Structures are given as structure tokens and as C-alpha cells.
Image (cartoon, rainbow, N blue to C red):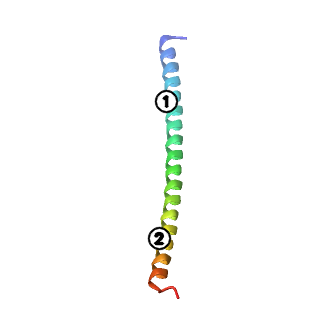
Amino acid sequence: MSSNQNISFQAGQAKGQTQEKASTMMDKASNAAQSAKESFAETGQQIKEKAAGATESVKNATGLNK
């Protein structure tokens, strides 16, 4: 193998490794984004339920729930 062929081969290997690492990082970022999305959805649902409960408590306290 000539020197130029060897350099080209090594460059190709480095490119492949870089692409693989970038793909792995993108997968991790996607997973983190999905996890955050699910967490925010759960938090939003909890806030919604607490607000509904608070509304009912106010209605009960003021006699509007009769």
C-alpha cells in the first residue's frame, strides 16, 4: 500500500468514526429531548389536576358548588 493510499484509508476510517460518534450524540440528544417532553407533559397534567382541585375547593368554600 502506498503512502497516499494509507493516508486515504486512515482518513476514511477517521471519517467513519466521526460519523458514528455524531450519530450516537444525536441519538442521546433525541432521547434527552423525548424524556424532557414526557416530563413536562406529566408536570402539566399534575398542575392541571391541582388547579381543578383548587377550583372545586373554592366553589365548596363559597357555596357555589350547590
Q: Nearer the viewer, mark 1 or mark 2?
A: 2
Quickly name the residue at label 1: 18
Q: Is residue 56 above or below residue 33?
A: below
Q: Position of residue 29 (x, y in %)?
A: 49, 43
The percent coordinates of residue 44 (x first, y second) are 49, 62
- Secondary structure at badge 2 equals helix
Q: Earlier in the sequence, mark 1 or mark 2?
A: 1
Vertical side of 53 occupied by 64: above or below:
below
Q: Nearer the viewer, residue 57 or 32?
A: 57
Q: CA distance from mark 1 to mark 2?
A: 49 Å
The amino acid sitting under disc 1 is Thr
Q: Which residue is mark 2?
A: 51
Q: Give the numbered dot on residue 49.
A: none
Q: Is residue 48 above or below residue 56?
A: above
Look at 49% across and 28% down and name the residue there.
Answer: 15
Q: Residues within 10 Å of mark 1 (few under 14, many from 20)?
A: few
Residue located 52% across and 68% down the image: 49
Tell how many labels. Answer: 2
- The amino acid pointed to by label 2 is Ala
Residue visible at 50% across and 37% down in the picture? 25
Please state which of residues 17 and 9 is positioned toward the viewer in this rendering. Answer: 17
Q: Nearer the viewer, residue 6 or 43?
A: 43
Residue found at x 49% / y 59%: 43
Residue 16: percent from left, percent from top: 53, 29
User: In what quadrant of the picture does the N terminus appear?
Assistant: top right
